[in-house]
């Protein structure tokens, strides 16, 4: 569910502004819109954060290619790190100038500039000779090379200084910097009028009791009200406990349903797990994902650990059903009923699975809408759309030859559903403003056919992943075919291992990318369009300490 919100107006004594904000931050229940802060105090705090981030990036970049375990880390302040970085940049610029000058004069050898000046002064007309440069260096070539070596040595010293900085010393202070920036923004947001100060925000209805208790203790004036028409409260998604890890995925994707929309966490997680498994398409890859997840258990947030475990287990289960392991199969599993059925050489069965998943996904959205709208008459139109989607499911399977024809009763289902959608989508009083949607009905019906067909990507992408794995296997094992000397076979065996590791690593990366593209799309576009979720909301982010 999406937690109901209350708009809160809070009034306090102006002299207690900072104390009030400290208490609100400790309460951690009120969402304040801090995005418009532009004051000097906020800018200074934000500048400190930017400097801290730049310092950490500088340290990590300086450490690239070094053995981190051999470094003796020392705590350094942000200002020290940035000062060393500025010195290094100055030295690099000087090194570039010296290198450019050395390249210019190197063809003329290690001549003495002072002697050259005397010769040029004595021999008139020598300046016109093209082989002699018009300007002379400030020092001998050998001196420039020595100076360049010293500059490069100082750069190396600065690199080592940066590499030995303990970025953890800076990162541990980062939450305090973030708190300072947000406090400055909140202080700017809190307006005052005479002897009183006031601020507005949003609070979940379930936390209003905590706010009332704090107001009673601090002597605040608090006004709570429901959101008014046109207001857009923040969205706090509160899924059932089993599906609560989905909040981490929503946060990671940076999406949130609007406050007035539905919480789709449950179907999102169920179908996303299925999409993950089919797009990866290989049980061995699922085992690798699971092993990596378990290895990172202590470092991963609990929600992400749960999500990745579920997705990995789903992928392993799909590998068992399809008998696919690193693009190959276990001989003993070749006769499993699921393997035979999914392994149909015409691919009709696996496409049937994809279309069935798609139809169920989209019909769930429409039926859910209908149940939520009862007893309003528009609920009939939503049920009608479910009927149209069912008809389009049979049309899709007929088009690709899975079904020989469309059952005759489905024609009646389509007719009744079409009438229901046409008559009940728009209420008579709204025909002037929304009547155009009826004119778009034929296009929307064809679009629903395309939506179901788009689920075939689960088969296409999953098959592509398996075929890439098979090709890498063939390429690697092909090196070992034929009679060859032992030494050559040993050398080729190393090549075989390298090809297998590199090939399957690449395939794993492509699978991860396909999940971000296709699994997310099917949930946030096809399903969400039918459910009416626009993902136009913004997440509830209470004012609190980090």
Image: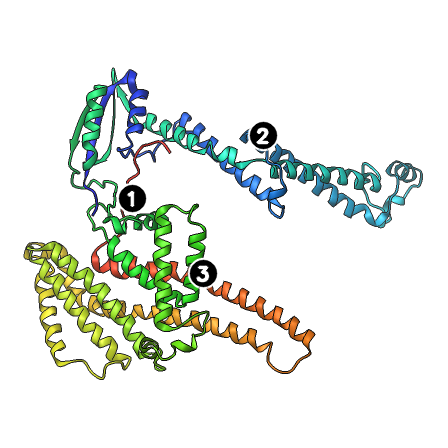
Task: Determine the residue located farthest toward the front in the rendered image.
Answer: 332
Q: Nearer the viewer, mark 3 or mark 2?
A: 3
What is the x, y in percent for residue 66? 63, 46
Q: Residue at x 60, y 76 (%)?
A: 479
| Residue at disc 1, secondary structure | loop
* Left or right for 505, reference 459: right
Residue farthest to the bottom, as pictured: 404
The residue most toward the right is 122
Query: Few, some or many C-alpha atoms within 10 Å of disc 1 (few <14, some 14-19, many ≥20)?
Result: some
In three-dimensional space, the C-alpha distance between marks 3 and 2, rounded to whole angstroms, equals 42 Å
Residue 35 placement: quadrant = top left
Answer above or below: position of 389 versus 189: below
Query: In this view of the protein, can residue 499 be seen by the observer?
Result: yes
Residue sitting nearer the eye, 542 or 309: 309
Front one among 120 and 206? 206
Vertical relation: 501 (above or below) 216: below
Residue 496 horizontal/vertical position (percent): 58, 71
Residue under the point 38% across and 34% down? 546
Q: Which residue is mark 3?
A: 288
Q: Which mark is residue 286?
A: none
Which residue is found at the position 15% from the left and 80% from the top? 407
Tag 1 or tag 3, which sits nearer the N-term? 3
Q: Which one is earlier in the sequence, the residue at label 3 or at label 2?
A: 2
Does the residue at mark 3 contact the one at mark 1 (Cβ under 8 Å)? no
Q: CA distance from mark 3 to mark 1?
A: 35 Å
For label 2, count other residues whose C-alpha is less than 10 Å away and answer few (under 14), some (14-19) or many (20+): few
Q: Which mark is residue 80?
A: 2
Which dot, 2 or 1, sits closer to the camera?
2
- At 53% across and 37% down in the image, what residue appears? 167
Q: What whole-number distance in Å separates the C-alpha atoms at marks 2 and 1?
A: 38 Å
| Circle 1 residue | 538
- Image check: 206 left or right of 27? left
């Amino acid at each position: 569910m999406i937690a109901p919100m209350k708009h809160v107006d809070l009034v306090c004594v102006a002299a207690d502004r900072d104390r009030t904000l400290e208490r609100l931050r400790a309460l951690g229940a009120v969402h304040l819109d801090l995005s418009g802060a532009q004051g000097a105090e906020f800018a200074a705090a934000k500048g400190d954060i930017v400097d801290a981030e730049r310092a950490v990036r500088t340290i990590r970049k300086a450490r690239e290619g070094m053995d981190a375990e051999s470094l003796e880390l020392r705590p350094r302040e942000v200002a020290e790190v940035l000062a060393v970085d500025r010195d290094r940049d100055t030295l690099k610029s000087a090194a570039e100038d010296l290198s450019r000058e050395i390249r210019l004069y190197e063809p003329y050898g290690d001549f003495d500039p002072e002697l050259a000046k005397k010769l040029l002064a004595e021999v008139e007309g020598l300046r016109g000779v093209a082989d002699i440069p018009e300007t002379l260096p400030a020092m001998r070539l050998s001196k420039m090379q020595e100076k360049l070596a010293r500059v490069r040595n100082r750069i190396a010293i600065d690199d080592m200084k940066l590499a030995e900085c303990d970025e953890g010393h800076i990162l541990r202070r980062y939450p305090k910097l973030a708190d300072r920036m947000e406090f400055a923004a909140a202080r700017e947001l809190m307006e005052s009028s005479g002897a009183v100060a006031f601020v507005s925000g949003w609070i979940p209805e379930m936390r209003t009791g905590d706010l009332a208790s704090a107001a009673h203790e601090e002597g605040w004036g608090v006004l709570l009200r429901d959101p008014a028409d046109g207001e857009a409260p923040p969205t706090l998604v509160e899924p059932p406990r089993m599906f609560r890890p989905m909040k981490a995925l929503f946060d990671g994707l940076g999406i949130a349903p609007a406050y007035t929309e539905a919480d789709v966490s449950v179907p999102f997680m169920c179908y996303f797990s299925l999409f993950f498994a089919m797009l990866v398409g290989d049980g061995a890859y699922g085992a690798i994902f699971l092993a990596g997840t378990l290895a990172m258990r202590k470092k991963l947030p609990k929600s992400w650990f749960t999500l990745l475990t579920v997705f990995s287990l789903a992928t392993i289960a799909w590998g068992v059903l399809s008998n696919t392991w690193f693009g190959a199969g276990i001989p003993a599993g070749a006769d499993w009923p699921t393997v035979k059925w999914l392994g149909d050489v015409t691919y009709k069965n696996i496409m049937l699975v994809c279309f069935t998943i798609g139809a169920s996904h989209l019909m769930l959205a429409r039926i859910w809408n209908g149940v939520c709208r009862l007893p309003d008459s528009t609920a009939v139109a939503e049920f009608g759309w479910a009927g149209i989607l069912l008809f389009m499911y049979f049309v899709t399977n007929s088009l690709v030859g899975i079904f020989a024809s469309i059952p005759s009763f489905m024609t009646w289902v389509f007719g009744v559903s079409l009438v229901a959608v046409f008559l009940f989508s728009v209420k008579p009083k709204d025909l002037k403003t929304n009547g155009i949607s009826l004119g778009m009905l034929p296009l929307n019906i064809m679009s629903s056919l395309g939506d179901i067909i788009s689920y075939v990507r689960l088969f296409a992408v999953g098959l592509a992943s398996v075929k890439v794995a098979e090709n890498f296997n063939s390429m690697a094992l092909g090196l070992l075919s034929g009679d060859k000397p032992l030494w050559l076979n040993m050398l080729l065996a190393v090549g075989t291992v390298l090809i297998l590791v590199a090939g399957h690593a690449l395939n794993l990366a492509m699978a991860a990318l396909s999940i971000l593209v296709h699994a997310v799309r099917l949930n946030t576009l096809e399903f969400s369009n039918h459910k009416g979720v626009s993902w136009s909301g913004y997440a509830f982010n209470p004012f609190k300490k980090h």
